[in-house]
Image (spheres, rainbow, N blue to C red):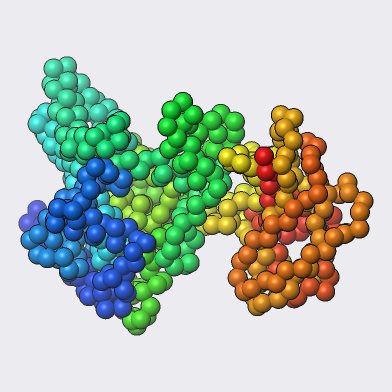
């Protein structure tokens, strides 16, 4: 699939245009930073609860010598132990020196993508890919913040470029340089470790003609990967008495995205900046991981147990994360574009000619498919696509955030350039219309599929298929065993969940069935039902909760509910439960109209009945059965 849309560019003109595109990208980043530093406080004065603030404070403590090395490195350390301190020492601790350096890294990334994809698919593809990097809204946006996304995007772009150079030269020393860059990417964010086996395989395939040179190249690459990590690993070993590598946060980040309660991403799009959801199982797993002695159960062990007990449930969660990774959604955390406010809606960061992931992801997927459908597929093309997919896998192993996906966007911009040249070239080529009709149809179908998948793939699954599939892969709902209690529930997480408020007047009476696992004959200390209510205004809620087997008169309780979301817990007058227990909740029909119950429309076990309607039309009632031991 070669494009005839563009005339051949001379080498000199190519470099001139690429330089102009890189300078354009540099200008856009600096201008956007100027506006953001005026309108968005997170640039100049980040909240103490954000990673930006933490990195800044750590970097300052490195400079003044107050950093506590005896605690080791919890976060990935390179950004706040080397990158920021060097900038601060040279140019001071203001926000502009960091912005300028990260803008220059952004311009360098544009240059690298242009060179890489020009060598891979031709100069027009390289220039279009570079232009898309220059115009990417979120690469521009994140340049203003002390977060490692921009640095990591540079490392990965440099890594792929150097791998291409090394594959052409076949010199072992070049593979050693690739290893060093990979090592710096690892100490910037640990998921770059997944690149190591992939690159080693590529090294051996490229240098298979000489066993000695292959071994030498692989060794040099391995040493290059390890060397940047050694100082940090030694500090962590001294601090903790065991090997953690460069960071000791692996258990925490693994727990966030791999518990039975985990949402697929940090926060919903358009919700603004803020904390992620930390469910009960996360805290329990961290507690068990921190125990000393034989009682300790590490997070990897707990993940393995869950996979063993519910393999399909774990795979379903990872599939949801995969769909979310490739979705147009930009998941906020420390910062969010909707929060910028203040300035005009026509400010640079919001102008329509900047491109978002809907364009980059769609064209990028199309470009990758086009590239592997050619009669002769280049080995390095297969390698680069494998790097992208490895990064995707390395992200969904943990959890999905916009700033975690961002470092792979420059490579997707390169493939977007190829997808665009192939698609437009096919339209422009009027020769052999009959012979090329199948190819044109294939190109069109691929492009349509890519845009539909990126634009609506996750949403279609979420709202049309998730409830049915969850009912199949996790038929008993969720059971969370904590230190002093066991919690049963059928609803999913609030983040990326289907929680909707339903007026209490519309429910009146709810019958809820829980699938309860026998507690090995142990008599529970007490049993309670927890459920949230959402109040638009302050009001009074009158309710009664009991087991269906109880034949007593309802025992009404009255609570005053303040505006917002609140959980109510009520004790049940029972001392044991059968395998399958039914809880009945009665609600006063004249309850305050502004107080609502919550139902999860993305779960449908058919274990919730509303009044005389039978199975709830709203999904599963958000409620928990708590058995205290």
Q: Please tell me which residue lies in front, 46 or 437.
A: 46
Taking the spot 14% from the left edge, 56% from the top edge, the residue there is: 63
Q: Quadrant of residue 535?
A: bottom right
In front of the other: 303 or 101: 303
**Left or right of 526, for residue 375:** left
Q: Nearer the viewer, residue 610 or 253?
A: 253
Count of numbered tags = 0
Identify which residue is drawn at 33% across, 40% down: 248
- Where is residue 343, by image quadrant? bottom left
Residue 124 in sight in this render: no
Image point (53%, 50%), residue name: 279
- Which image quadrant: the N terminus? top left
Q: Residue furthest front?
A: 525
For residue 489, side relative to residue 71 (left or right):
right
Residue found farthest to the top: 211
Residue 329 lies, with reference to residue 280, above or below; the image says below
Q: Position of residue 43 (x, y in %)?
A: 28, 69
Horizontal side of 379 relative to 460 (left or right) equals left
Classify residue 34 as left or right of residue 594.
left
Find residue 310 and report its horizontal and vertical position in percent. 59, 34
Residue at 72 percent of width and 32 percent of height: 522
Closer to the camera in the image, 270 or 239: 239
408 lies above or below 385? below
The quarter of the rendered structure image containing the C terminus is: top right
Up-down relation of residue 62 to residue 343 (above or below): above
* Position in image of residue 31 (x %, y %): 21, 74
From this viewpoint, is residue 251 visible? yes
């Amino acid at each position: 699939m070669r494009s005839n849309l563009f005339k051949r560019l001379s080498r000199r003109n190519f470099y001139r245009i690429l330089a102009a595109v890189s300078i354009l990208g540099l200008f856009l980043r600096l201008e956007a930073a100027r506006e953001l530093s005026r309108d968005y406080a997170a640039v100049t004065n980040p909240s103490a609860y954000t990673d930006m603030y933490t990195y800044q404070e750590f970097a300052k403590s490195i400079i003044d010598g107050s950093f506590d090395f005896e605690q080791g490195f919890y976060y990935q350390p390179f950004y706040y132990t080397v990158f920021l301190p060097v900038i601060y020492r040279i140019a001071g601790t203001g926000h502009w020196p960091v912005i300028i350096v990260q803008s220059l890294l952004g311009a360098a990334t544009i240059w690298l993508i242009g060179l890489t994809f020009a060598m891979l698919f031709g100069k027009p593809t390289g220039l279009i890919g570079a232009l898309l990097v220059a115009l990417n809204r979120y690469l521009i946006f994140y340049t203003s913040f002390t977060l490692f996304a921009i640095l990591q995007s540079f490392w990965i772009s440099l890594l792929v470029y150097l791998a291409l150079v090394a594959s052409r030269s076949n010199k072992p020393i070049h593979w050693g340089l690739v290893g060093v860059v990979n090592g710096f990417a690892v100490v910037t964010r640990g998921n770059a470790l997944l690149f190591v086996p992939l690159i080693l395989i590529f090294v051996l395939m490229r240098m298979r003609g000489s066993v000695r040179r292959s071994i030498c190249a692989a060794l040099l690459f391995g040493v290059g990967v390890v060397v940047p990590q050694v100082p940090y690993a030694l500090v962590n070993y001294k601090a903790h008495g065991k090997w953690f590598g460069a960071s000791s946060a692996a258990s925490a980040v693994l727990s966030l995205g791999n518990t039975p309660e985990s949402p697929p991403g940090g926060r919903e799009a358009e919700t603004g900046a803020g904390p992620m959801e930390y469910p009960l199982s996360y805290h329990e797993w961290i507690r068990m991981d921190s125990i000393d002695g034989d009682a300790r159960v590490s997070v990897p062990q707990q993940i393995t147990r869950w996979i063993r007990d519910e393999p399909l449930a774990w795979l379903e969660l990872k599939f949801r994360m995969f769909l979310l990774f490739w979705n147009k959604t930009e998941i906020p955390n420390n910062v969010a574009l909707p929060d910028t406010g203040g300035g005009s809606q026509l400010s640079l960061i919001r102008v329509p000619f900047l491109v978002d992931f809907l364009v980059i992801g769609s064209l990028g997927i199309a470009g990758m498919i086009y590239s592997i459908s050619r009669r002769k597929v280049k080995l390095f093309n297969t390698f680069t696509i494998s790097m992208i997919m490895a990064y995707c896998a390395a992200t969904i192993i943990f959890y999905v955030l916009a700033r975690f996906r961002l470092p792979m966007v420059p490579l997707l911009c390169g493939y977007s350039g190829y997808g665009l040249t192939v698609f437009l070239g096919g339209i422009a080529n009027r020769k052999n219309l009959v012979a090329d009709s199948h190819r044109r149809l294939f190109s069109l179908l691929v492009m349509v599929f890519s845009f539909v998948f990126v634009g609506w793939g996750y949403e279609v699954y979420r709202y049309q298929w998730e409830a049915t599939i969850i009912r199949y892969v996790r038929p008993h709902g969720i059971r969370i065993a904590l230190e002093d209690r066991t919690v049963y529930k059928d609803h999913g997480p609030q983040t990326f969940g289907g929680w909707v408020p339903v007026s209490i007047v519309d429910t009146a009476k709810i019958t809820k069935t829980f699938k309860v696992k026998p507690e090995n004959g142990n008599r529970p200390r007490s049993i309670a039902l927890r459920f949230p209510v959402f109040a638009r205004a302050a009001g009074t809620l009158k309710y009664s909760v009991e087991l269906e087997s109880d034949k007593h008169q309802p025992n009404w309780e009255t609570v005053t509910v303040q505006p917002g979301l609140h959980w109510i817990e009520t004790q049940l007058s029972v001392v044991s439960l059968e395998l399958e227990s039914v809880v009945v909740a009665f609600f006063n029909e004249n309850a305050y109209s502004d107080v609502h119950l919550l139902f999860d429309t993305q779960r449908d076990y058919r274990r919730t009945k509303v009044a005389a309607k039978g199975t709830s039309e709203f999904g599963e009632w958000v409620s928990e059965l708590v058995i205290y031991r």
